[in-house]
């Protein structure tokens, strides 16, 4: 893990600071917001993820000797800006939706307040973390909903960069996945880990039976045997003969899954292995999981699809200045007017309107702090005057986010679970 996160950014963040320091505007108080104009992939809702990771990275956003030397050697900024960067610490305030919360277009999922220079430096870092993690969590949430009460495991590390793989496992767990194959995610974030053997283990041995015996002898009969290396019916028969009817599970990684699963279930039952579970993998996404709803599947393993956001690898979040003070210290609302990229100026609060039964009906983005009856406040302080709220960090923060996600999804109307492309399930109302 790198000691400093300061260069995980774009060059123009630093050159803006350089120019603002020269112009005398670098220390104007500012409010930046992170939001998305639309939900990627025409999803019905989004899921905020990555907040705890971002807080850790903000704490490590320091320009140490190595970073300052590189910036100087490459003439990125002027000498007086290097002196300012040497003492950089974020001393502002960050509030936002709690990690795991659902969001909609226009939702101010993160609000960053402080001097212009100290806030603008965090733009790239905030977007790179929140865009990826939220895309994974949004896809994972759809998969969990499609799976119903059947557990889903994340196993996509080999389809992502080594650091992204850990972030993806964390985000998927927050969104309801039961476990991951990634050990670093287990160590760093206390995500439950699981895994047994791949096809290479079967191919290593002189026979499938020899491979199964080796696995059983080491891991016990509650293990999961992979039965599609050669012929599935033969493998199932061999697995029960070796392990007995108390075999924990079999895994299927190929074939026409609805047909194959039904055949394997019937064969297991005929061999007396009625409690042996069936887990399936094989390039699943939320649509494939939903198609198996009527099949006797006990659990799912999802790899590639979840770590790439199931076709939407980023949430399209942006980081925009919405207000700043002038030379007299007065607050001024500012907003872009660009075609298709317009923003709404001013510091905002966010609430979710609920009906009498506790079902969410709309997302309220307000330019005042007046909370109406039947509304749930969404913004919470995450970092105040440079001090991070520890409840949102570490393994405990991940568990808190997982619980937050479960409760926020439970508020959504039933149509939120549709997998077809469509409009957000809640309208965003500005007031």
Image: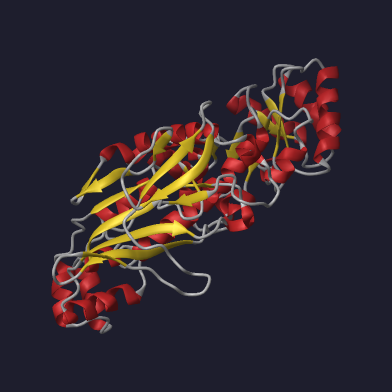
Quarter of the image with the N terminus is bottom left
> Visible in this render: residue 206?
no
Q: Nearer the viewer, residue 332 or 132?
A: 332
Q: Residue at x 24, y 74 (%)?
A: 17
Question: Left of 300 or right of it: where is 96?
Answer: left
Please state the horizontal and vertical placement of residue 114, each as a whole percent of the image: 22, 60
Q: Is residue 127 above or below residue 70?
A: above
Please state the horizontal and vertical placement of residue 219, each as a whole percent of the image: 59, 27
Q: Is residue 154 above or below residue 35?
A: above
Q: Nearer the viewer, residue 94 or 77?
A: 94
Q: Residue at x 61, y 42 (%)?
A: 142
Question: Left of 315 or right of it: where is 30?
Answer: left
Identify the colour scheme used: secondary structure
Q: Residue at x 25, y 77 (%)?
A: 71
Q: Can you tell which quarter of the image residue 247 is in?
A: top right
Please state the horizontal and vertical placement of residue 324, each as a whole percent of the image: 25, 66
């Amino acid at each position: 893990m790198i000691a400093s996160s300061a260069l995980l950014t774009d060059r123009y963040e630093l050159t803006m600071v350089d120019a603002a320091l020269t112009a005398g505007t670098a220390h104007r108080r500012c409010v930046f917001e992170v939001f998305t104009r639309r939900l990627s992939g025409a999803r019905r809702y989004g899921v905020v993820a990555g907040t705890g990771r971002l807080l850790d990275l903000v704490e490590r956003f320091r320009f140490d000797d190595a970073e300052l030397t590189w910036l100087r050697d490459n003439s990125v900024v002027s000498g007086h800006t290097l002196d300012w960067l040497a003492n950089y610490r974020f001393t502002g305030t960050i509030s936002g939706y709690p990690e795991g919360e659902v969001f909609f277009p226009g939702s101010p999922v993160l609000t960053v307040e402080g001097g212009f220079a100290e806030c603008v430096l965090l733009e790239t870092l905030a977007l790179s973390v929140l865009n990826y993690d939220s895309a994974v969590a949004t896809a994972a949430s759809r998969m969990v909903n499609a799976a119903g009460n059947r557990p889903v495991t994340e196993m996509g590390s080999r389809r992502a960069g080594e650091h992204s793989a850990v972030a993806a496992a964390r985000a998927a767990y927050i969104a309801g996945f039961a476990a991951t194959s990634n050990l670093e995610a287990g160590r760093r974030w206390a995500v439950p880990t699981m895994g047994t053997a791949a096809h290479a283990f079967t191919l290593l041995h002189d026979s499938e039976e020899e491979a199964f015996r080796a696995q059983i002898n080491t891991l016990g009969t509650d293990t999961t045997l992979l039965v599609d290396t050669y012929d599935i019916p033969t493998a199932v028969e061999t697995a029960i003969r070796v392990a007995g009817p108390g075999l924990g599970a079999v895994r299927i990684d190929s074939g026409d899954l609805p047909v194959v699963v039904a055949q394997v279930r019937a064969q297991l039952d005929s061999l007396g292995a009625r409690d042996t579970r069936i887990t399936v993998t094989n390039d699943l996404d939320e649509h494939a999981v939903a198609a198996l709803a009527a099949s006797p599947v006990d659990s799912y393993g999802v790899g590639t699809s979840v770590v790439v956001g199931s076709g939407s690898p980023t949430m399209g979040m942006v980081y925009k200045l919405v207000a700043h003070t002038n030379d007299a210290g007065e607050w001024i609302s500012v907003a872009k007017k660009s075609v298709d990229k317009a923003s709404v100026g001013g510091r905002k609060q966010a609430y979710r309107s609920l009906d009498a039964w506790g079902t969410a009906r709309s997302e309220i983005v307000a330019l005042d702090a007046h909370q109406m009856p039947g509304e749930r406040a969404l913004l919470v302080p995450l970092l105040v005057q440079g001090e991070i709220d520890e409840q949102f960090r570490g393994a405990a923060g991940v568990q808190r986010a997982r619980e937050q996600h479960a409760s926020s999804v439970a508020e959504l109307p039933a149509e939120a679970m549709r997998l077809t492309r469509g409009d957000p399930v809640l309208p965003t109302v500005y007031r």
